[in-house]
Amino acid sequence: MSSRKFKDSMPLAPLKIVALGNQTELGEKINKEIIARRHKALSEMQKPDFKMTGYDTENYLVSYDCPRFGTGEAKCVINESMRGVDLFIIVDTVNYGQQYTMRNETTNMSPDDFFMDLKRVIMACSGHPRRITVIMPYLYEGRQHIRYINESLDCAQALQELVSMGVETIITFDAHDNRVQNAIPNHGFDNFFTSFQFIDTVVKTNPDIKIDPEHMMVISPDLGGMKRAVYYAGALGIEMGLFYKRMDYSKLIDGEHPVVSTQFLGNDVSGKDIIIIDDMISTGHTILEVAKELKNRGAGKIFICVTFGLFANGTTELDNAYKDGLFDAIYTTNLCYCPEEIKNKPYYHSVDLSKYIAAIIDTLNHDTSVNDLIDATQRIQELMEKHSMSI
């Protein structure tokens, strides 16, 4: 934030951030980024136009505890006052690496457990914050957002629960389907995109890569990710392709509708490097099937870019596919939990979003528009110009 914009906007209230236990590492990075941003902004001003308690501090993270009883029941205790603050709560609902003890046995935390802890934090604030914003990168139950048969609408229900508890805005990233925001039409719902950060990381890790229609193509593995792929293709000035999967929505096997047939829609991929774009990689079956088909069609290097690396079935299948040359690299963000085992894989690259989230929080705390942060087109074009000059 420039000093001019800094002077034109007063902070809504003192900033406080709760990074739920599963987001401690990301929370600490965000905390450091905001501290650095504000120190820089203040240094650019000869005399600040306002003075607010806690604005220029060395820590915005809230001290809290979420202890559990032997039965698995829990509570939240906030160790400092939340009265009048602008509170941001960050939660990773799919952190399968966090555990707790119940009846003397270790139990993995589930998305339901994380969502309940989020509500406990809100309840522990006792309605005292000036404003509450929830940053939920992986939207809780985001894949259960529509109804085909007699099914529950978990995501919509969860959003309504949060706003009924006093949450003003919900922030997510690369939502599986952002139309779920229609469940809370009178409250804030911001869906941020990670396109710039992905492209920036791919370019940095592959400095010789050629990004033009002759050498590269963007592929969406299914119809749901088509809009995302269209944006990437337009921003990079390259072509896109799509794998269309016809599904049988009358059946549900292991929580998923079975695929009846798959068809590729797009131009020739022979000799071109490929960026496969998707919002998540769960079991990895779909992504690897797409990569295999692209290799059969003569594609060059294949870079898999997914916002959330869930790796529900481990990495054995991915390891074997990498050894067989089906793909060259996998990029996922640090918005959700990633174990050290995966971070140490030769094909894995992490895309850091801490600076982006820090900018979002700082901008919202000053009660100014985040439209410039949502639209990354100009930043991507500037990055492409700089990259084209370097090769």
Image (cartoon, rainbow, N blue to C red):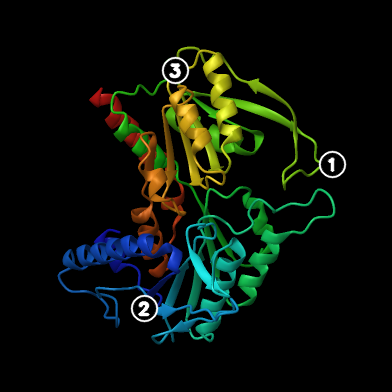
Relative to 5, 152 lies left or right? right
Say which residue appears at 84% left-offset and 50% top-offset.
149
The local crowd at label 1, few if under 14, some if 14 to 19, many if 20 or more residues have their Cα within 10 Å, is: few
Q: How far is disc 3 from disc 1 in space, using C-alphas?
A: 38 Å
Instruction: Find residue 182 and report its horizontal and vertical position in percent.
Output: 68, 58
Examine the image and state in which quarter residue 279 appears.
Answer: top right
Q: How far is disc 3 from disc 2 in space, using C-alphas?
A: 51 Å
Earlier in the chain: of badge 1 and badge 2, it is: 2
Q: Element type at marker 3?
A: loop
What's under tag 3, amino acid-wise? Answer: Gly
Earlier in the chain: of badge 3 and badge 2, it is: 2
Q: Element type at marker 1?
A: loop
Is residue 167 visible from the viewing direction of this image?
no
> 73 above or below 216?
below
Instruction: Find residue 172 and report its horizontal and vertical position in percent.
Output: 52, 56
Query: Which residue is identified by label 3?
Result: 300
Earlier in the chain: of badge 3 and badge 1, it is: 1
Query: Which residue is identified by label 2?
Result: 14
What's under tag 2, amino acid-wise? Answer: Pro
Is residue 82 visible from the viewing direction of this image?
yes
Answer yes or no: do the residues labelled 3 and 1 have beta carbons within 8 Å? no
What's under tag 1, amino acid-wise? Answer: Ser
Examine the image and state in which quarter residue 6 appears.
Answer: bottom left
Query: Which residue is identified by label 1?
Result: 250
Residue 235's disc number: none
> Which numbered disc, 3 or 2, marks the residue closer to the eye?
3
Examine the image and state in which quarter residue 211 appears.
Answer: top left
